[in-house]
Amino acid sequence: MLRTVNRVVVGLVGLILVAFGGSVLAVGLGAHPPSWWIYDGRHDVLLSTADRERWHDDGWWWPAVIAVLAVCVLLALWWLVAQLRRRRLSEVLVDTGDGEGALLRGRALEGVLAGEAESLDGVERAGALLTGRRSTPRVRMGLVLAPHAEAGTALRRISEEALAHARDSAGLAALPAEVRLRAVKHRAERVT
């Protein structure tokens, strides 16, 4: 979702800047703007003194300006915190028994979990995401089950096989998991 928000925000800001900057450039180079445009011609300023001081003496002006700026600052801070916060775990600390430990890439473990889950009977597609801390990871898995699969059996096999293998191979005491199951969409079979 964050990637989508980033693309939309950057796209909108870019579109606004290109449209406004392009129109200013075009008028500055001698193009004639429409009558409703914010300035009239090549030697006109963007904001005249009258435009800048129009609402200066009104009581609502400064609270409105401060509120809009505060909302902009809060949105910018939210966006910055969202950029810095990582949802995906990049590495898992594996206890090697020598006190040092080793680092296992999170994407590698996710790929192994998804691959082993997809190899089980009745699982069409699988995805895994590691979250949490590198010493105490958590797994979020999404499984798409085939029409003939039983959800309870698939969940038991995921827990006993794929998650148990990952937990044991990484030397973790526990590997909590959240598994979301969906059935693959298929057409009804006709009986003739």
Image (spheres, helix red, strand yellow):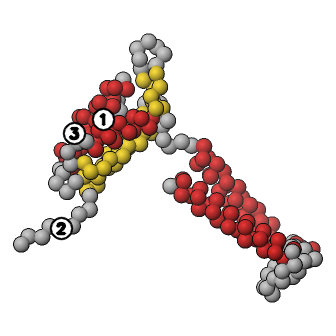
Could you say which quadrant of the image residue 68 lies in? Answer: bottom right
When the figure is inspected, residue 77 is found, relative to residue 58, above or below; the finding is above
> Relative to residue 39, is residue 129 drawn left or right?
left
- Secondary structure beneath disc 1? helix
Q: What residue type is labelled 2?
A: Ala
**Residue at 73% across, 67% down:** 18
Q: Cβ–Cβ below 8 Å for labels 2 and 1?
A: no
Identify the residue position indicated by label 3 in the image. Answer: 157
Task: Give the Cα distance between marks 2 and 1.
Answer: 33 Å
Q: Which of marks 1 and 3 is nearer the N terminus?
A: 3
When the figure is inspected, residue 111 is found, relative to residue 136, above or below; the finding is below
Residue 88 visible within the image: yes
> Relative to residue 49, is residue 67 drawn left or right?
left
User: Can you tell which mark lies on residue 163?
Assistant: 1
**Residue at 18% across, 68% down:** 188
Task: Give the Cα distance between marks 2 and 3.
Answer: 27 Å
Q: Residue 123 location in percent, x, y?
A: 25, 48
User: Can you tell which mark lies on residue 188?
Assistant: 2
Q: Which of marks 2 and 1 is nearer the N terminus?
A: 1
Q: Residue 32 location in percent, x, y?
A: 84, 83
Could you say which quadrant of the image residue 84 lies in? Answer: top right
Q: What residue type is labelled 3?
A: Arg
- Secondary structure beneath disc 3? helix
